[in-house]
Amino acid sequence: MRNLELKVRCPDGALLGDIAQLAAAAGATPQGVLWQRDTYFHAPRGRLKLREERVEDASLNGVEGAQMADSHAALIGYTRPNLARSRESVYLISPIAAPATLVAALKATLGVRLVVEKRRTLYLLGATRIHLDRVVGLGAFVELETVLYEQVSADALSAEHHRIIQALGLDRLPVIAGSYSDLLEAGTAE
């Protein structure tokens, strides 16, 4: 699978609320609030992470400390250049039934690079996932992922991606070239 993605830093965490309002005004639909733990492993090429995810109870969306329900895990392998602009990511996702066992096996064979934890509010608009993220130790970010479906022209999907950047005002925020794991490794804190 492929997507076009952009990640920007929000200098003020309160800005995420404003961006959520802009997303809703643009027609995005809220999908809920997720807690995610990404365990990154050393990989000879690309990136490899095990994502453990819990979906907050829909009746408690947006409430800190809400009870969690509906958890799942997936192993995600991906490649993406570290560029301070929208860039293409190529990825594969494999659902995992026993994440603790897999983490132990990968830790023993590849070694853990680091762990990223975040609270993500998810919106969908067309083929684009809008992530409003609060990353432990890093702060607030917005990430767009426009899925590049083979049935739709890449030009049309790229145009959608750039329209959403404009609609949310993301072109005025600092673009992040790497991943949250890169920022944590570099010690780039809030």
Image: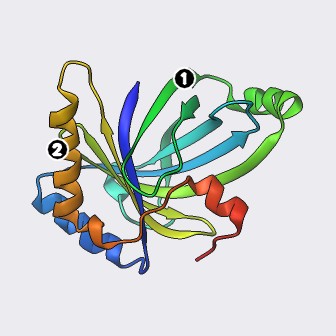
Which residue is at 42% across, 64% downward? Answer: 175
Q: Quadrant of the C terminus?
A: bottom right
Residue 171, given in percent of the width and then of the height, sits at 28, 66
Residue 16 in sight? yes
Secondary structure at badge 1 equals strand
Which residue is at 48% across, 61% downward? Answer: 176
> Circle 1: is it few (<14), some (14-19), or many (20+) Cα within 10 Å?
few
Which residue is at 67% across, 62% downward? Answer: 184
Residue 159: which disc?
A: 2
The answer to whether 34 is drawn above or below residue 189 in the figure is above
The answer to whether 120 is drawn above or below residue 47 in the figure is below
* Quarter location, residue 132: bottom left
Give the residue at mark 1.
95
Residue 84, given in percent of the width and then of the height, sits at 45, 58
Q: Depth check: give the residue in front, 102 or 183.
A: 183
What distance separates the C-alpha of mark 1 from that of mark 2? 31 Å
149 relative position to 43: left or right = left
* Quarter location, residue 98: top right
Q: Going by the picture, which residue comes out furthest to the top? A: 151
- Identity of the amino acid at label 1? Pro
